[in-house]
Image (tube, rainbow, N blue to C red):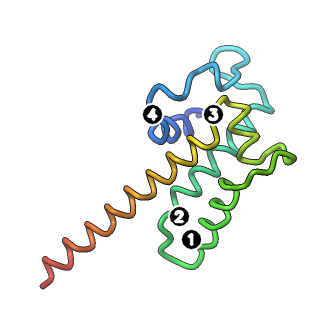
Amino acid sequence: MDVRELSEPVLQELLGATAVLPEQFGAQGPGHPCGERALMWAVLADGIECYRRNAPPLSMQQEIEFEDAERWVWSTDWDWPFSFVNLCEAFGFDPAAVRQALQSWRGRRSALRRQRFRHSALRAA
């Protein structure tokens, strides 16, 4: 299983099913991205997954990892090749739109966790 197979559903869920197009992966042959693009995709997908996996943080370690991922996502560093904005640009994503999608996802996730907590608290009472 290649990086795309693991990462594509994450971005499709996050950005909408039609937002990630096959040509955005820069495939060199049937279904195989070139080495540099595969690495770039892996970094972008891992950063987004780290953000999602640790939001909202439930432990000190998750808080540290979330803050690192959040800092990377919100950075506007155009000098570093693997910065969030450069990777989004390389794959044709608008960094502001991806950030907005992440914030919306985080808000829905937080609301869901609060809702679940209330329901279990009511059952215990």
Q: In 3D space, how far apart are the residues under numbered discs 2 and 3 (Cα atoms)?
A: 23 Å
The residues tagged by marks 2 and 4 sit, at their Cα atoms, a distance apart of 21 Å
Q: What's the amino acid at mark 1?
A: Gln
* Mark positioned earlier in the residue sequence (2 or 4): 4
Amino acid residing under circle 2: Asn
Q: Are marks 4 and 1 in contact (CB under 8 Å)?
A: no
Do labels 1 and 2 touch, CB within 8 Å? yes
> On the image, numbered disc 4 is attached to which residue?
16
Is mark 2 in CB contact (under 8 Å) with mark 4?
no
Say which label, 3 or 4, has the lower sequence index: 4
Q: Marks 1/3: CA distance? A: 27 Å
34, 10: nearer the viewer: 10
The quadrant in which residue 71 appears is: bottom right
**Is label 2 or label 4 in front?**
4
Which one is in front in this view, the residue at disc 1 or the one at disc 3?
3
Q: Earlier in the sequence, mark 4 or mark 1?
A: 4
Q: Position of residue 59 (x, y in %)?
A: 52, 77
Element class at badge 4: loop
Relative height, residue 110 to residue 76 (above, below): below
Q: Which mark is residue 93?
A: 3
Across and down, in percent, residue 70 comes to: 63, 60
Secondary structure state at the residue bearing disc 2: loop
Q: Disc 4 marks which amino acid? A: Gly
Which label belongs to residue 54?
A: 2
Q: Which mark is residue 92?
A: none
